[in-house]
Amino acid sequence: MIYQHPLAYLLGLEGVALPLVRVGPGGELGYMPIWSRLASDYLAAALPLGLQVRRCEEPRRQSPLVGEDGTDLYDGVRPPDHAPGDPPNIWSLHARATAATNAAWRGKPAAIIWHFQLSAP
């Protein structure tokens, strides 16, 4: 079983896109496609359609993200160590370098939330 961090689904929205490895139907390993978008990408798509930005929020991740013992402070779980033969588990690296993990995630947004309104015709 592949451990998926509770924040993983947010990471492709804005910021860092991570290589999420999955096992395919034939047992082969593959990477799940994830796309990172810049705020300007959203604007480039929305503004020509007549959408106006009413508000934009970027809630920050908690800091620190992991404790000194490698436990995820968001959910209290320590990601399992990598098992030889299994797909790479990027989350298991957090427990091995807690200071680097916390420095890398400090101040980063967990998501970008847009409130658009369609302009009057």
Image (spheres, rainbow, N blue to C red):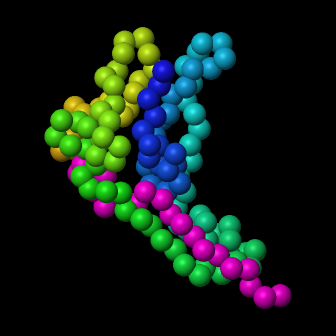
Residue 105's spot in the image, x, y percent?
31, 52
Give the answer, above or below, for where 24 lies relative to 107.
above
In the image, residue 119 above or below residue 5: below
Q: Position of residue 97 (x, y in %)?
A: 21, 36
Total numbered labels placed on residues in the image: 0
In reply to whether residue 83 is colored magenta, the answer given is no
Horizontal and vertical percent position of residue 90: 38, 32
Q: Is residue 31 visible?
A: yes
Please indicate whether residue 92 sits to the left or right of residue 97 in the image.
Answer: right
Say which of 16 and 70 sits in front.
Answer: 70
- The residue positioned 55% from the left and 25% from the top of the image is 22
Residue 76: name its quadrant.
top left
Looking at this view, name the residue that lies furthest to the right: 121
Q: Is residue 55 left or right of residue 45?
A: left
* 113 part of magenta stretch: yes
Quadrant of the image occupied by residue 69:
top left
Q: Which image quarter holds the C terminus?
A: bottom right
Residue drawn 75% across the image and 74% down it? 49
Question: In this rendering, is residue 5 above or below 31?
Answer: below
Q: Which residues are magenta?
A: 101-121
- Where is residue 66 drawn, in percent x and y? 25, 44
